[in-house]
Image (spheres, rainbow, N blue to C red):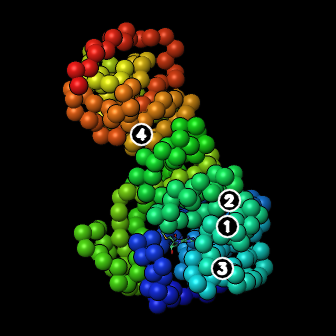
Amino acid sequence: MKRTIDHALLDNAKINKKDEFYTILSDIENEIVHYTHLFHGKIVYCNCDNPQYSNFWKYFYDHFVDLELKGLIATYYDSESICWKYDGKEITKNKLQGNGDFRSEECKKILQLSDIVVTNPPFSLFREYIRQLTDFEKEFLIISNINAITYKEVFALIQKNKIWLGINFGRGISGFIVPQDYELYGLETEIRETGERIISPNNCMWLTNLDNEKRHEPIELVKNYEGNEKEYPFYDNYQGINVNKTKDIPADFTGVMGVPITFLNKFNPDQFEIIKFRKGDDDRDLRINGKSTYFRILIKNKRIQHPAVEIPVMQPSLF
Ligand SMILES: C[S@@+](CC[C@H](N)C(=O)[O-])C[C@H]1O[C@@H](n2cnc3c(N)ncnc32)[C@H](O)[C@@H]1O
């Protein structure tokens, strides 16, 4: 299919301006390559994607045969929204009654009939977006801001192993195409020869419930708690130690450890269990010597059978 990018269209997509970040084709390719075997016989739905400029539509259209897809559907948010369908032979287009809001009844009906949702949804509606996907029990592979991990409802799903991070994370997603008049001030940016304006934030990730190889690889633990106790202070308000970097998780510690959010990028649920996040026993932020730490996820190593180290009894907090 010959496909021209209509920049006027891109610029006019201003229904919710801060959501207009378009995904770069190579970023889509670099992620989906890890799941290709999971698409056979499936109907893919891109429900925030105008096929005239969505690289998600382009990717699935171009790879329809090699992914052995059954169908491809796209709808998008616009007063004149159209539903595009492709069955491997022809594209059919039908005008939607409403504006293509992913929450509308007609889009929910399409969702019901689809198998896997793949897109970059509006971040401003992310909570609603993921709730709908999980309510409909759909498979999905979507782009999100890393900050979404800190949303209670998203974290609860990660903790229960219902959803997890995809392969590419942070700088692993190269950037997004933004409308021509988008303010680039203060952002890492590039204007390509094609005129495309790209911003490169390092705060995005893929979120999915499709299995991938990364979540089965154990984190290599090279440090020990014993002999390095000073590096791993106990929290004032939780019986557990603070670990500043995922690579420093001690191999011999049987108790609970607080690790940074980026741990989830390496999380293997057979190796670690997620206990809770952010708060201590007093339901306030985790603290060390009275000072709140950065957002921490409390985890436990599942593979240490016998206490290798005696866990010291925590002193009552003065704070
Ligand atoms: C981050 S952009 C990504 C666009 C496209 N999925 C891509 O990756 O190139 C999110 C898109 O969702 C659209 N959008 C905003 N609210 C929406 C809604 N309620 N339903 C469907 N799409 C919406 C925005 O207009 C925007 O085009």
Q: Position of residue 26 (x, y in %)?
A: 49, 67
* Quarter occupied by residue 118: bottom right
Q: Quadrant of residue 269?
A: top right
Q: Which residue is mark 1?
A: 45
Above-or-below relation of 283 to 55: above
Name the element at disc 4.
helix
Amino acid type at image mark 3: Gly
The answer to whether marks 1 and 3 mark residues whose Cβ atoms lie closer than 8 Å is: no
Inter-mark Cα distance, 4 to 1: 30 Å
Of the pair 270 and 135, the residue shown nearer to us:
135
* Residue at numbered disc 3: 98
Question: Is the Cβ of the residue at disc 1 closer than 8 Å to that at disc 2?
Answer: yes
Secondary structure beneath dot 3 equals loop
The residue labelled by disc 2 is 116
Q: Earlier in the sequence, mark 4 or mark 1?
A: 1
Callout 2: SS? strand
Q: How many marks?
A: 4
The mark closer to the camera, 3 or 4, is: 3
Q: What crowding class fits label 4: few (fewer than 14 Cα within 10 Å), some (14-19), or many (20 or more)?
A: some
N-terminal of the pair, mark 2 or mark 3, is 3
- Hey, what amino acid is under mark 1? Tyr
Task: For marks 2 and 4, give the CA distance.
Answer: 27 Å
Q: Give 138 or 246, whichever is nearer the viewer.
A: 138
Q: Which mark is residue 263?
A: 4
Decide if residue 179 is in sight here: yes
- What's the distance in space between the residues labelled 1 and 3, CA to CA? 18 Å
Circle nearer the N terminus (1, 3): 1
Q: Is residue 134 left or right of residue 191?
A: right
